[in-house]
Amino acid sequence: MSARTITVEITGMHCASCGILVDDCLEDVEGVVTSQTSTKTGMCVAVVSDFVSDVDVLAAVDEAGYSGTILSSVAAS
């Protein structure tokens, strides 16, 4: 399986529960391997299969109730 790492800037998070909700929504997307969200930095780093699109990732962030911007998407090592 080829994978890539996506970094997303997320706006609107205020507490640890917000980060957990984002991670839960992302991890419900088929092909998302891991998701780690920091409310301190407002960033999420997700490792996803190549077939997961940036749109899929942003849709999951939106489903959690937040806005996201893709900052980077690189092949996972």
Image (cartoon, rainbow, N blue to C red):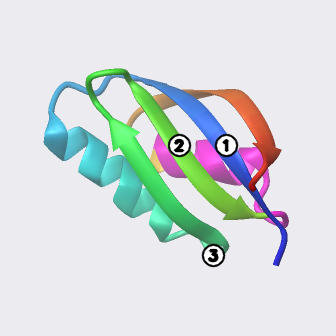
Can residue 64 be seen here? The reply is: no
Mark 1 / mark 3, whichever is N-terminal: 1
Residue type, mark 2 in image: Val
Q: Is residue 75 above or below residue 69?
A: below
Q: Is residue 19 left or right of residue 73?
A: left
Residue 45 disc label: 2
Q: Is residue 56 magenta?
A: yes
Residue type, mark 1 in image: Ile
Q: Which residues are magenta?
A: 50-62
Can residue 2 be seen here? The reply is: yes
SS class of the residue under badge 1? Answer: strand
* Percent position of residue 66, x then y: 41, 33
SS class of the residue under badge 2? Answer: strand
Which quadrant does the C terminus fall into? Answer: bottom right
Which quadrant does the N terminus fall into? Answer: bottom right
Would you identify the image quadrant in which residue 56 lies?
bottom right
* Percent position of residue 24, x then y: 36, 62
Q: Is residue 49 above or below residue 18?
A: below
Residue 30 disc label: 3
> In this figure, which residue is indicated by the disc labeled 1?
6
Q: CA distance from mark 2 to mark 3?
A: 16 Å
Residue type, mark 3 in image: Glu
Q: Is residue 16 above or below residue 71?
A: below
In front of the other: 6 or 24: 6
